[in-house]
Structures are given as C-alpha cells and as structure tokens.
Image (cartoon, rainbow, N blue to C red):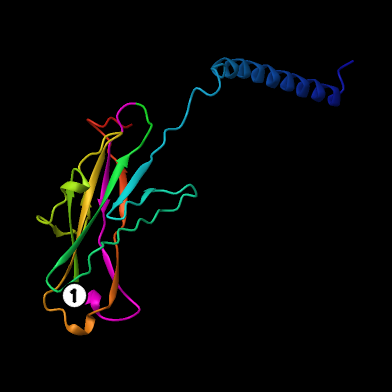
Amino acid sequence: MGIPRHLRAAALVAAATLMGLLTVQGSYALWAVAASATPGTATAASFDVSLTGTPTGQVTNMTLPGGQAAIISLNPSTALTPGNAVYSSVSAINNSDAGGQFNISVTAGAPVVSNVAGGALATYVTVAARTAATAGTCGTTNYLAIPAGGLTSVAVPKGTSATLCFEVRLASNAPATVKGQSVTVTIPLTATQLCGVPSGCA
C-alpha cells in the first residue's frame, strides 16, 4: 500500500524546511564569527571647519549642530568713502579628527552686493579677494575680483588654517546721493576635502 499523496507532500515540505534550517544555521555561524569584533572600535571622523572673522573676532563652526550653514559677520569698522576700500577676512581652521592626512580647501564664491532699505549704493561697490597665511598678512594690495569658479585657498592640513581676505571698494565716481546708504555683502564659503596624493583620502 503506497503513502497517501497528502502525507508525501507533507514529508517533502518537512524536508525542505529542514534543509532551510540547516542553511540558515550554517550562514549564522559564519556571520557570528565575522561579528565577534569588540563593539565600538569603529568611529566616524568629523569634518569640522572653524571660522574666525576679522575684525569682529566672531568664531563659529562652518556647519552648525542642526546641519545648517553658519553665518559669520565681518563688519569692517571703517566707513566707505569714494575711491577707498575697507578690509576684512575669514580664517578657516581644519579641525577634522580623521586618522591619517585630511587636507581641505576653502572656496569663496561669487559675492552678492545688496542695498539695505533701498538706495543705489550697491551699483558703486565692488568686491575683491586674495588668500593669505593669516589675517595679519592680508594687507591692502594684490586683490582681484573673485573669478566665476570662486577663489580657493591652498591645501589646509589638519590643525592648520588658511585665510581668505576681502576688499570692499566704493567707486570714486559714487554720487553724493548715496551718502549714508548701506549695503550687505554676502560671500558663500565652501570647504572641500582634497583627495588623492598627498592628502590620501579614499
């Protein structure tokens, strides 16, 4: 007398289930071995860039804890007069705690000059920039218009800094009608990790 069809099907299902369990057990043993490393040995490196503005002395991280970009105020203390300029700078410190080399560069993008409360002062204001080793070495010469691709600092290794210097100049032909008006100059800053030799990032 043969095995009824439903019992034979049940036997096949049981065999398939048993094979599946054996496969899982084998995989689990391999996974368990691979996972036996001490927890907490792998940590993520930080990509922190600290900014210091001159002449205000304001210090901030480039990226705030919530992930939004910081705003740093430079506010030159000297008023603009026709044909003259005011100067300020931002020093960027590479505070990464990554292992090995971790070089960055900092780029100043195209400036946006906007009138405050109306007026026409922005028409007569130009912005130029240069790089320097420190804020104290910016000086008042060798400033050029920021190119379309931005002005990029030299490579900044961990624990060191680079400075971007800014010149805001009022045209000598600015009319008396703009006297007492104000502008806001916004310059976006971007920090980028440098990969390849010699920075060594993966």
Say whether residue 179 is left or right of residue 2. Answer: left
Residue nearest the viewer, comparing 110 with 201: 110
Q: Quadrant of residue 86?
A: bottom left
Name the residue furthest right. Answer: 1
Q: Between residues 131 and 175, which one lies in front from this camera angle?
A: 175
Q: Residue furthest bottom?
A: 177
At horizontal 26% and vertical 34% (from top left) the residue drawn is 157
- Above or below residue 85? Residue 133 is above
Could you tell me which quadrant the N terminus lies in? top right
Q: Residue at x 21, y 85 (%)?
A: 177
68 vs 168, nearest the viewer: 168
Rendered residue at 26%/57% (across/down): 109
Measured as percent of width and height from the top left, residue 97 is found at 38, 32
For residue 33, above or below residue 92? above
Q: Is residue 117 magenta?
A: yes
The magenta-colored residue range is 100-123
Closer-to-camera residue (157/61): 61
Q: Residue at x 85, y 22 (%)?
A: 7
Residue placed under numbered mark 1 in the picture:
124
User: Does the magenta segment cover residue 9?
Assistant: no
**Left or right for 184, reference 139:** right
Crowd band around label 1 with a 10 angstrom C-alpha radius: few (<14), some (14–19), many (20+): some
Q: In the figure, is residue 186 to the left or right of 66?
A: left
